[in-house]
Amino acid sequence: MTAPSRIALAALCAPDADAQTSPTPAQAIDMTRTDSSLSEADLVGLWITENGHIRLELLAGGRYDEARGARRSAYTGRWEIRGPGRIFFADDSGFTATGTVADGTLEVGGDRFRRDGRWD
């Protein structure tokens, strides 16, 4: 039997060359823009899948806390902006994943999230 992924965001990957890049400083929030430039302020907050099962809270300072179903803090780790529309996640146990943000949707490992679960 295969062990479940330690980072619920899945999409495991090896660290890339820009692994030491620091998060971009916070600026004005505008999740509808399509130029793919992101700031920490654009991303901090609660992101929820359409079915509500996964709740990913991106915290200021580059930490995240993910809940799954009734399991609070199922996965924790750090996150940082890695380029236009790209986010890097590192689970506290060492697993890594990358995600993309476009048009107000965060997508990681096939899971799609919207801020505060606003799918309308």
Image (spheres, rainbow, N blue to C red):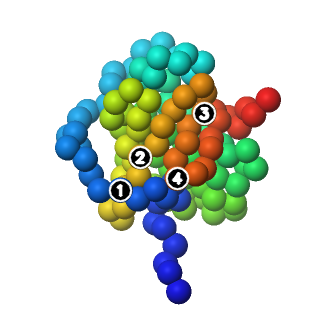
Query: x and y percent of residue 31 in the render?
Result: 57, 21
The quarter of the image holding the C terminus is top right
As measured in the structure, the alpha-carbon distance from the residue carrying label 2 to the one carrying label 3 is 14 Å
Name the residue tied to disc 2.
98
Determine if residue 9 is in view: yes
Position of 72 compared to 93: left or right? right
Label disc, if present, on residue 37 of the rendered structure: none
Name the residue tied to disc 1.
13
The residue depicted at 65 percent of the width and 35 percent of the height is 114
Q: Earlier in the sequence, mark 2 or mark 3?
A: 2
Query: x and y percent of residue 115 in the render?
Result: 63, 33
**Does the CB distance between marks 2 and 3 fall below 8 Å?**
no
Q: Is residue 45 above or below residue 108?
A: above
The residue depicted at 58 percent of the width and 51 percent of the height is 110
Query: x and y percent of residue 8 in the render?
Result: 53, 59
Q: Secondary structure at mark 1?
A: loop
Q: Is residue 18 above or below residue 96?
A: above
Q: Earlier in the sequence, mark 4 or mark 1?
A: 1
The residue lying furthest to the top in this view is: 28
The residue lying furthest to the right in this view is: 120
The residue depicted at 46 percent of the width and 43 percent of the height is 99
How many C-alpha atoms fall within 10 Å of the one at disc 3: few (<14), some, or many (≥20)? Answer: some
Name the residue tied to disc 4.
109
How many C-alpha atoms fall within 10 Å of the one at disc 1: few (<14), some, or many (≥20)? Answer: few
As measured in the structure, the alpha-carbon distance from the residue carrying label 4 to the one carrying label 2 is 8 Å
Q: Earlier in the sequence, mark 1 or mark 3?
A: 1
Amino acid type at circle 3 is Thr
Q: Is residue 119 above or below residue 93?
A: above
Label disc, if present, on residue 105 of the rendered structure: 3
Q: Earlier in the sequence, mark 4 or mark 2?
A: 2
Amino acid type at circle 1 is Cys
